[in-house]
Image: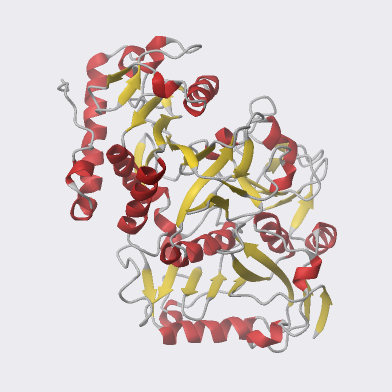
Amino acid sequence: MQESGVWNKSFGIDLFGVKGVKSVAYNLGPAPLYEESIRRGEAVIMPHGPINAETGIHTGRSPKDKHTVRDALTEDKVWWGNNNSITSDQFETLLGDFKKHMEGMDLFVQDLYGGADPAFRVKSRVITEFAWHSLFIRNLLIRPDASQLESFVADLTIVDLPSFKGDPARHGCKSETVVALDFDRKIVLIGGTNYAGEMKKSVFTWLNWTLPAQGVLPMHASANHGEDGDVAVFFGLSGTGKTTLSQVPDRTLIGDDEHGWGKEGVFNFEGGCYAKAIKLSREAEPEIYATTERFGTVLENVVFDPVTREPDFDSQEKTENTRIAYPLDFISNASASGRAGQPKNIVMLTCDAFGVLPPIAKLDPAQAMYHFLSGYTAKVAGTEKGVTGPEATFSTCFGHPFLPLHPSVYGGMLGELIAKHSVDCWLVNTGWTGGKEGVGRRMPIKVTRRLLAAALDGSLARATFRTDPYFGLAVPTSVPGVEPHILEPVKTWKDKAEFAKTAKHLVEMFAKNFITFENHVDKAVLDAAPVMKIAAE
């Protein structure tokens, strides 16, 4: 076996039990990984420097193909209502087949940290079949110094083999695509998918498993802070604006996707950003757009002109879920440490395609708990096969697919932290106004930015509020620089009866979704549920 790169010579890939591998390249940087990905036909070079790779039929995660080993360690701890299980024997067979599959391969290894706080980070070794996957995960996690690599011993091993095909009868999986986690052996196996995001989310899942026992709340959230160190945390599902709204020039970006919140404050899990590229605009998102013209950036499934290779960020020809993966330091005002103090504000983002939620509302602690456990957003027509109109999505804790433990664990921790640090909480709708998707218009980003600015500088908390009769939320009556009518969604609709009907429908969906949590929360949280005080006609 030929080995190259920089690594701990006493911690080679052979210790994982791999035999017959042709070569292993450890901790290569962007330039050699570019060369390998191009030589192997994995990606193409785009104008101004990035590479662009296609992921085939898998243009997003495969949550139904994710499995956790059910054993003595996990039996009474894992939330099995949300996690598919396989046996230890099935995982052992799968692991053996993975090792067999690696024979004769040229492999790439990255030794990386998950977590900016040394007290809580996980040392991760990521073994990949594709060179561009190695660059992707190098961009997304935290890169040790070369001096640290020479003594690096991983706690968690992730093996990523897109060409491997799972066998349901043999491995206990559901299809040829398989993501299998063994928390006891600290191994993640990913096969049958070219989608690189599975690797980063595996680290997030691991931290969701380990950190609560250490008093740290893992969060699917971005975070930034102002000049005075005031920290804001942004919860939100894909497409709600989490990355866009947290990357602003007047605040320092801590991270765009995954954080921990403990006794010392907030810390980033990652060393990079994984932003949606669809409809990316140089004017609206200049910092993010600039990363698409940088050497070292990885584009996923972005359509481009076959002659000039100029990207078309508006095209959904391959997928609506086009992506950009870049190191955090590509953002000019990113935090060097990835750490900050206690949050002053929490923002829960939702893209309400029904167009009935207000653009911003202040949440009391019970409402914050309710909406955190609900994790509401909405899909719009065309985002997925078969979606022809707005569809509600409830992803508890804004991270349903990544939760090994019951949501009440994470929700209880959030409630305690909000109370302890007197955090102001906000619900922000980045979705539609003036009607449903297809009828109304998308909430202007300038309006959302102005509302957020007022929330984060503390002025909005001192505003006059009304109680929304449709959802029971505290909504400001006026905000400087924002037209008053947009703060009251019903006034933006021509058909008031249709608004009431639509609002009632969404309230009912909230209630139906929350049934599963009723026995896990106190009365105050139950009473925080949206209740219409105006009857729908």
- Would you say residue 258 is visible in this rendering? yes
In this picture, is 61 found above or below 316?
below
In this picture, is 163 found above or below 398?
below
Q: Nearer the viewer, residue 349 or 454?
A: 454
Q: Position of residue 183 (x, y in %)?
A: 47, 75
Picture colour scheme: secondary structure
* The image quarter in which residue 196 lies: bottom right
Q: Position of residue 514 (x, y in %)?
A: 24, 47
Q: Position of residue 480 (x, y in %)?
A: 48, 12
User: Left or right of 394: which side holds 166?
Assistant: right
Q: Position of residue 251 (x, y in %)?
A: 62, 33
Q: What residue lies at 67% left-to-right and 58% top-to-bottom?
A: 142
User: Left or right of 43: which side holds 429?
Assistant: left
Q: What residue lies at 47% left-to-right and 63% top-to-bottom?
A: 211
Q: Nearer the viewer, residue 491 or 454?
A: 454
User: Left or right of 155: which side holds 485?
Assistant: left
Count the labels in the image: 0
